Image: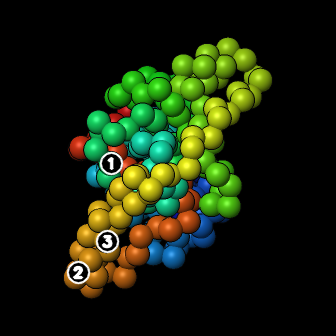
Amino acid sequence: MNLGHGIHSPAMDAYRMYAERFGDDGVKWLTFGQYLECYMNNGYVVSTPKMFICARPVPRDAHPDDIGNPLLPFPVEDCDAWFVAIMAGDPRLCWTYYPLDLKYVGYQRSAEEPIRWFNNNRYRRIIMGSSKPPDPEPVPPPPTEDNKDKYAAKRQAQKNRSERRGNQSTILSSGGGGNSAASSGKTILG
């Protein structure tokens, strides 16, 4: 697929970022359209003429592979952070659309890098009024034996459903940006 060349909008910029990172055909099994569908079902997609964002609430102490899997929803009551999978356009506008006030916000530049977590209020103040990049929050402690495989049963159930459908989808294991969240996803188009 070769779309979006010459078109300048935050949504097309997001598509081009996705294509550069994962190729025009997506992450082995997930095209950009399927990726958006995951966020429409398990997170939030906001597209306006000035900004585009795919994000979802996540628990920071979840395994990075679970945070990076847009097919795996988390119970909202377990979530303390927004994971921003893709954002393009004016970042100052994203707080207008966050439906939940969560303490942290995080993103991941590549699957090889760890997720960077920031205090949401501090990050917002910096984005709204300064060009100095914020310092990341301390990395949360690694998963303990108690929460290490907290979502393993959900991962396995999702994998089993995919296999039963004959779907060649597999759980995104590279953390590559995407996340799940609210009990029902919302799409906001402006």
> Quarter of the image holding residue 128?
top right
**Viewer-side residue, 161 vs 156:** 156
Element at label 2: loop
Q: How would you rate the neighbour count of disc 2 (Cα within 10 Å): few for under 14, some for 14-19, many for 20 or more?
A: few
**Which residue is found at the position 57% from the left and 40% from the top?**
140
**Viewer-side residue, 15 vs 27:** 27
Q: Are marks 2 and 1 in contact (CB under 8 Å)?
A: no
In percent of width and height, residue 138 lies at 65, 35
Task: Determine whether 161 is above or below 151 in the image.
Answer: below
Q: Which residue is mark 3?
A: 156
> Quarter of the image holding residue 176?
bottom right
**Which residue is found at the position 41% from the left and 70% from the top?**
171
The numbered dot on residue 74 is: 1
- Mark 3 or 2 closer to N-term? 3
- Mark 2 or 1 closer to N-term? 1
Per the model, the C-alpha gap separating discs 3 and 2 is 14 Å
Quadrant in which the C terminus appears: top left
**Which residue is found at the position 54% from the left and 19% from the top?**
121
